[in-house]
Each structure stands twice: as C-alpha cells, then as structure tokens.
Image: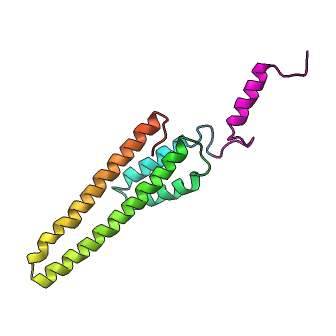
Amino acid sequence: MSDIPTEREQSEAEMDFNAHNGTGMPPSQGEDGGNSMVNIVYILYLIGFFIPGTSALGIILAYINRNDSREPYTSHFQFQISIFLTGLIYSVAGLLLYLFSIAITAISGGIGAVFFVFPLLLMLWWAGWTIYSIIRGLRALGRNEPIY
C-alpha cells in the first residue's frame, strides 16, 4: 500500500482537527463544545428568581467559559452575560426609585406613596424581560443556533 493518504483519510483528519477548535487540542468544554454549560447557566438564572446568588454563580460560569467554547455556544455565553448586566442595571434603577419613593412619601406626609408603583412596575418589567430572554436563549440552544 501507498503512504499517500486517500481523500477519505484526509477528510477524516481534517474533521478531527476542526473538532479540536483548529488547535489540535480538544476544547475544554468537552465533546459538546459548551452546550451543557450554557444550559446550566440558563437554569441558574431561572433558579436565581427563588434562591439569591445562583445568578451570580451563573455569570461567573459564563465569563469563565465564553472563550473556551465554540459557536453557537459562545454567542449564548455573551447573551447570558448581557442578561445579567442588564438585570443588574434594572435592579439598581429599581432600588433607586424605591428609595426615592420612600423619601417622597416621608416628605409629603404619605401622599407620595403613589410613587411606589414605579419601582414595582420596573421590577415586574425586568422579571418578564429576563424570563423571556432565558426562554428565547433556551429555544435557540435547543435548535443549536446562535443567539444575538
């Protein structure tokens, strides 16, 4: 037999190399390229509505794994980071509005209590947007599509 690789052998060698992110080394995410970790982060975000701190663990995992994954999972990690940071902005804004409502209520002798509606509406909007974004991300992940 000849030492020259056949076309099929070359194709298989190229697939092996591409499966290792073009570096010859396997990706650190295992065989799924990051799929399971993306799922875990989405689930941690959902659990974060009931158990404080789990969404913070989720963003840490997303930051750690975003550069070691391959597409479409890299886009999901970026999306998860943006979900967390947007939620953080909404939370700070809601807290500031709440504190403002307390001050207005104290100054006005109770009439300003109507301002408590604004932080409540803002936080409800944030919760709805976050749940929608997580579901949108899980659906795209289920189809193995990137999310932007």
Q: Residue 137: horizontal and vertical position, in percent?
A: 42, 43
Say which residue appears at 44% left-offset and 56% top-offset. Answer: 82
Q: Residue 22: horizontal and vertical position, in percent?
A: 71, 40
Q: Quadrant of residue 139?
A: top left
Say which residue appears at 16% left-offset and 71% top-offset. Answer: 115
Q: Residue furthest bottom?
A: 107
The foreground one among 62 and 3 is: 3
Q: Residue 84: horizontal and vertical position, in percent?
A: 42, 58
Taking the magenta stretch, the answer to whether it contains residue 20 is yes
Judge whether 1 appears above or below 76 on screen. Answer: above
> In the picture provided, is 103 more to the left or to the right than 48?
left
Say which residue appears at 46% left-offset and 43% top-offset. Answer: 147
Judge whether 75 appears above or below 55 on screen. Answer: above
The residue range painted magenta reads: 1-28
> In the picture provided, is 4 more to the left or to the right than 146?
right
Say which residue appears at 43% left-offset and 38% top-offset. Answer: 140
Number of marks: 0
Quadrant (top left/top right/bottom left/bottom right) for the N terminus: top right
Q: Residue 27: horizontal and vertical position, in percent?
A: 66, 44
> In the picture provided, is 43 more to the left or to the right than 16?
left
Taking the magenta stretch, the answer to whether it contains residue 49 is no
Instruction: Check the image and tell me how it is coloured.
Output: rainbow
The foreground one among 27 and 67 is: 67
